[in-house]
Amino acid sequence: DRMGQIFGGMVMNEAIKDKEKEFEEGLTPNADADDVYYKDEEKEEDSEEDDDFKLDDDDGANVLEALKERRLREMKKEAKLMAENKSKGHGEYNEIGQDDFLTTVTKSKHAVVHFYHKDFERCKIVDMHLREIAKTHLEARFACLDAEKAPFFIGKLQIQVLPTIILFIDGVAVDRVVGFEELGGEDDFDTIHLTRRLVRSNVLKAKNKAEAGRIAIKKRADKSDSD
């Protein structure tokens, strides 16, 4: 009986070990399957992420293309406007007569007209600066008019001091620069000061920070005889 019990116990232990082995072997395929399942899920997630990245890349490319097309249209529009302005005399600084005055200030959206006297030195200084500004600011028409030969408009515009610069937008006088008081009061002011003044009147568009008045301009140092 004792031997039978021992033998029976051994059999049971072996049977338990076999069952445990079968159980473990049964788990292994399922675990592998789970791994495959999770790996497949990861692949799907990666694939979805890749699609998202592709979508973002496509959107970015579309935005860049749209920006390029818009900029190209703007450049074409600017080129066309520049060509039209040049045909109206923009880019130059010319003298006009009283009979040409109305056509000059109404034909262009922006116009700058200097009323001068041929014997006034300060009028010659203004001529020099406006001639330089006109070369780079084609958005406005620049001209000068002899005050002695334009008594009608001198009276209508109530011009009493020379030099006087009248600024026009769509044919309407919107502002004026009289003498040199706003330009420092000295004859040797820099062109940038007059440019800034015209920009503030909205007849010119600032091309840089200096013209926009966002950069301080150092006062010109006096030169000695030895210099």
Image: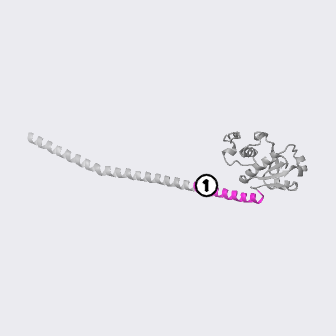
The colour scheme of the drawn protein is: one colour
Residue closest to the eye, 212 or 51: 212
- For residue 189, which quarter of the picture? top right
Residue 15 placed where, x, y %? 19, 46
**Residue for point 22% across, 48% down:** 21
Which stretch is magenta? 63-89
Q: Is residue 56 left or right of residue 227?
A: left
Tell me if residue 81 is in the magenta stretch: yes
Tell me if residue 24 is in the magenta stretch: no
Q: Is residue 146 above or below residue 218?
A: below
Residue 120 placed where, x, y %? 84, 46
Tell me the kind of residue under disc 1: Leu
Which residue in the structure is indicated by mark 1? 67
Q: Quadrant of the N terminus?
A: top left
Residue 227 placed where, x, y %? 68, 42
Q: Secondary structure at mark 1?
A: helix
Q: Main secondary structure of the magenta part?
A: helix
Residue closest to the eye, 29 or 97: 97
Q: Is residue 9 left or right of residue 213?
A: left
Outermost front residue:
226
How many numbered marks, from 0 up?
Answer: 1
**Residue for point 10% across, 42% down:** 4
Q: Is residue 159 above or below residue 93?
A: above
Asked if residue 174 can be seen in this view, the reply is: no
Q: Is residue 69 above or below residue 216?
A: below
Asked if residue 208 can be seen in this view, the reply is: yes
Residue closest to the eye, 159 or 199: 159
Residue 139 placed where, x, y %? 74, 53
Q: Is residue 60 left or right of residue 116?
A: left
Q: Count residues near mark 1 (Cα–Cα under 10 Å), then give few for <14, some for 14-19, many for 20+.
A: few
Q: Is residue 13 left or right of residue 145?
A: left
